[in-house]
Amino acid sequence: MRSLWLLQEIGVPFEVVEYPFGVALRDPAYLARSPLGRVPLLEDGPQDARIHLFESGAICEYLCEQYDPGMLWRWPGHVDRPAWLQWLHFAETMGQHLAALTQAHIAIRDPADRPPMVMKLEARRLEKTLGVLEDALAGRDYLLPGGFSAVDTGIGWSVHVAQWFTRLDAFPTVAAYHTRLRGRAAFRAALPGPGVETYLTKPFYAVPGAGS
Ligand SMILES: N[C@@H](CCC(=O)N[C@@H](CS)C(=O)NCC(=O)O)C(=O)O
């Protein structure tokens, strides 16, 4: 989703090929291009010089370098370059906690096998990352002083998914940032359309025994 959102923000034409979680991602032809069998996978360039990228942070940087006219990227030497890199990779730190929570609450099918301690710990660690954002966003609309950039798609998507596992009300500045991001036409254009199956089927995933 963060790659789709960025593509929409850049405005470059693209084609989406959907691979449902499960056997489609274990197909040898797919694994030859994305060896962990995960999404996203970006393919670009002519057939005789095709590139394949299977890490969303790398996809973000590549798309900015190749296609952004200068609004979303902060290139080497730019005054905001260090902060741009910081948030580009912090999105993956958040993604690790979201992946652990998704695994514990959703991917493990049998509730008896789900690990409440992991859910609790990862929710707390996710909240720590939201606390970092709460401070970083104080007094500004987006992560960088120069305004909206590609790193807001990476971090913004993590914030968006975080609301399924923790209450954003505890982080009012982050909640306002989330509202601001959701108002962007490119964000809305990237969301799954009606009828598309997503894995987040409940309104909220509470730790069992910890209330809602
Ligand atoms: N660090 C990778 C994470 C990729 C990843 O874990 N993707 C998930 C979906 S968000 C996936 O494909 N999961 C399917 C699986 O693990 O089988 C990235 O940011 O691209």
Image (tube, rainbow, N blue to C red):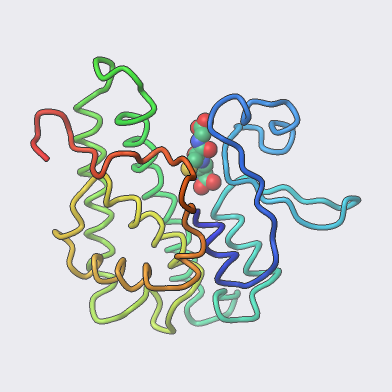
**Above or below, 29 relative to 140:** above
Closer to the camera in the image, 39 or 182: 182
Residue found at x 66% / y 33%: 35
Q: In the rendering, at what x and y percent does residue 33 appear?
A: 72, 38
In this rendering, position of residue 32 left or right of residue 132? right
Identify which residue is drawn at 75% across, 31% down: 29
Against 72, residue 153 (above or below) is above
Report which quarter residue 155 is drawn in: bottom left
- Residue under the image location 57 percent in, 36 percent down: 38
Residue 98 is situated, as x and y percent measured from the top left of the image, at: 35, 43
Residue at horizontal 20 percent and vertical 44 percent from the top: 124
In the rendering, at what x and y percent does residue 97 appear?
34, 42
Q: Is residue 134 left or right of residue 18?
A: left
Considering the image in quadrants, where does the C terminus appear?
Answer: top left
Q: Residue 153's spot in the image, x, y percent?
A: 46, 64
Q: Answer left or right for 54 relative to 199.
A: right
Give the left or right position of residue 199, taking residue 209 as reference: right
- Residue 71 in which image quadrant: bottom right
Query: Image height check: is 87 above or below 108?
Result: below
